[in-house]
Image: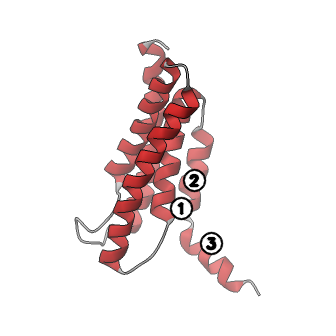
């Protein structure tokens, strides 16, 4: 993959991270600085990390193993930060950690494929939190 071919893909990865990060940051905007596990910058960087890992994996022979190893390392880091956030806030939620893992993966696939639609659906699902919770509460 040539540099000029990869720049638009990295731009898509950045857009994915910013979109999901904006949604996650919107819900935690009232929290004190330093108490959130991830915000708009973290999600943007997570997606770019995924894109970088995807580009590096594409350049070597064993794409799956390399990309998987980086994803596992990223998962450990984001889970530790989410755990710390849970201890600080007293709320237990896996949504931020899962959204971060998905953001990393979408960043990787923006380089290896095209995942723009999945990014929009993910951000929309995250943004519809109250509506989804209300709908689930009404189920009998």
Is the residue under label 1 in contact with that under label 3 (CB below 8 Å)?
no
Residue 53 location, x and y as percent?
44, 32
Residue 76 location, x and y as percent?
41, 54
Spatial separation of the CA atoms under disc 3 and disc 1: 9 Å
Spatial separation of the CA atoms under disc 2 and disc 1: 6 Å
Front residue of 58/106: it is: 58
Q: 119 left or right of 69?
A: right
- Residue 36 location, quadrant: bottom left
- Residue 26 location, quadrant: bottom left
Q: Which mark is residue 115?
A: none
Q: Residue furthest bottom?
A: 140
Going from N to C along the chain, the mark reached first, 3 or 2, is 2
The answer to whether residue 34 shows anywhere in this view is yes
Q: Which mark is residue 126?
A: 1
Q: State the residue at coordinates (24%, 71%).
A: 32
Note whether 46 is above or below 77 in the view shown.
above
Q: The residue tagged with tag 1: helix, strand or loop?
A: helix
Structural crowding at the residue carrying mark 3, measured as other residues with C-alpha within 10 Å and reported as few (<14), some (14–19) or many (≥20): few
Q: State the residue at coordinates (55%, 74%).
A: 130
Structural crowding at the residue carrying mark 2, measured as other residues with C-alpha within 10 Å and reported as few (<14), some (14–19) or many (≥20): many
Q: Which residue is mark 3?
A: 132
Number of dots carrying numbers = 3
Q: The residue tagged with tag 3: helix, strand or loop?
A: helix
Q: The residue tagged with tag 2: helix, strand or loop?
A: helix
Q: Which residue is mark 2?
A: 122
Q: 50 left or right of 132?
A: left
Structural crowding at the residue carrying mark 1, measured as other residues with C-alpha within 10 Å and reported as few (<14), some (14–19) or many (≥20): some
Residue 63 location, x and y as percent?
55, 27
Spatial separation of the CA atoms under disc 3 and disc 2: 13 Å
Front residue of 127/39: it is: 39
Q: State the residue at coordinates (53%, 42%).
A: 105
Going from N to C along the chain, the mark reached first, 3 or 1, is 1
């Amino acid at each position: 993959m040539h540099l000029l071919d990869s720049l638009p893909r990295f731009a898509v990865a950045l857009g994915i991270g910013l979109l999901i990060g904006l949604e996650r940051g919107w819900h935690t905007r009232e929290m004190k600085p330093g108490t959130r596990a991830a915000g708009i910058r973290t999600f943007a960087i997570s997606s770019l990390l995924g894109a970088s890992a995807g580009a590096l994996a594409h350049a070597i022979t064993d794409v799956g193993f390399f990309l998987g190893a980086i994803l596992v390392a990223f998962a450990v880091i984001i889970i530790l930060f989410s755990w710390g956030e849970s201890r600080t806030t007293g709320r237990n939620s896996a949504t931020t950690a899962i959204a971060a893992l998905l953001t990393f993966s979408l960043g990787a696939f923006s380089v290896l494929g095209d995942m723009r639609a999945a990014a929009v659906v993910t951000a929309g699902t995250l943004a519809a939190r109250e509506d989804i919770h209300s709908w689930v509460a009404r189920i009998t």
